[in-house]
Amino acid sequence: MINFARNFVEYTVEKIAQLVGGEVHGDQSTIIGGVAKIEEADSDSLCFISNKKYQHYLETTSAAAVIVGKDIQNLPSNKTCIICEDPYVAFTKVLITFFDYKSPHTGIHASATIEEDVELGSNVYIGPNVYIASGCKIGAGSKIYANSSIYENCSVGDNTTIYSNVSVYYGCSIGSNTIIHSGTVIGSDGFGHAPMPNGTFIKIPQIGNVVIEDNVEVGSNCSIDRANMGSTIISEGCRIDNLIQIAHGVKIGKNTVVAAQAGISGSTTVGENCIIAGQVGIVGHISIADRVQIGAQSGVSNSIKETGGKFTDSPHLPLSQAIRSRVIYKNLPELEKRITRLEQQNTAEK
């Protein structure tokens, strides 16, 4: 079980229900000391059920209280529950309020190098061996952790966190309330090389930048390339997982989610509220409509114009068509045997 932070006073089910806008079934004075999975909970744990198929745990769990949805019926009379619209969201609010990591770091470390004309907002934290180049602006309440580098003429908004070993190349912009995890590179050169008659290549200057808007989270060890001209744009509310390549000139719409090991090739536009699953590959110079979902390991080879469509496989197919194709593919060995028998029978009859 995860215990509440020691600086908090004890919390009752009543207070937690007020936080999440829930209705209490049972003893609202029950004291909660921590959170746990429902199958591992002890007598002062809070847990949740967001799927009816786990309802049977209500009869066996030792938890002090359980957050449940309104679709859960016949609640045990001896179990205290908090009934709300969305148990998963409610439990998330509890985690944010009581457990989310609160950095103790403040001030500017003596080993940091900050050029004289850098503008620092109030209450910033600059960690050991950080380098911030000329012309940069760092917003109020932002934190930049050890060994990160921010090069010339970059801007970072308010209350943004840049973890250790992040590199932000020149001229890039990062919004407010954004998180950049360790090892990520923002604004590295796009992959632009022109072939020469003698078989060599000449490097094409990448003179654009990267713009990451507000309320974005970028995972660890990602690479977001600067545009050849203009901007690579990660729009407000996006969630970018670990180990992702976003090439030059890509534009990703608001509140789109991209899972680990996906790669988006240059000059592609992805719409708003899309879900791109793990290891998806998307070719360059295409567009994807809003609210599109793309299944894991899919290869997207041309534009998707259908808003809200679901696709999978490589090359990508509509989900319903892909499922039918998989059934046929699975039956191919048996179909081959049947064809062979028919051919042999036909030959024998001749």
Image (cartoon, helix red, strand yellow):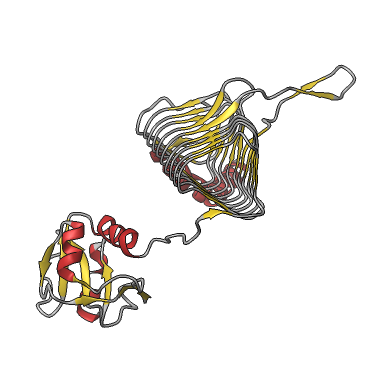
The residue lying toward the viewer, choosing from 278 and 63, is 63
Percent from the top left, x then y, of residue 223?
Answer: 62, 41
Q: Check the picture and name the quadrant holding the N terminus.
A: bottom left
The residue lying toward the viewer, choosing from 53 and 248, is 248
Q: Residue furthest top?
A: 197
Percent from the top left, x then y, of residue 182?
Answer: 59, 52
Percent from the top left, x then y, of residue 30?
Answer: 17, 77
- Is residue 241 visible in the rendered image? The answer is no
Percent from the top left, x then y, of residue 197?
Answer: 87, 16
Q: Quadrant of residue 194?
A: top right
Q: Is residue 188 left or right of residue 332?
A: right
Q: Is residue 342 left or right of residue 238?
A: right
Q: Check the picture and name the quadrant holding the C terminus.
A: top right
Q: Residue furthest right?
A: 198
Residue 131, above or below 252: below
Give the residue displayed 60% in from the left and 55% down from the top. Answer: 109
The residue lying toward the viewer, choosing from 108 and 280, is 108
Q: Quadrant of residue 154?
A: top right
Q: Is residue 169 left or right of residue 80?
A: right
Residue 345, above or below 110: above
Give the residue displayed 55% in from the left and 39% down from the top. Answer: 314
- Is residue 297 visible in the rendered image? The answer is yes
The residue lying toward the viewer, choosing from 206 and 256, is 206
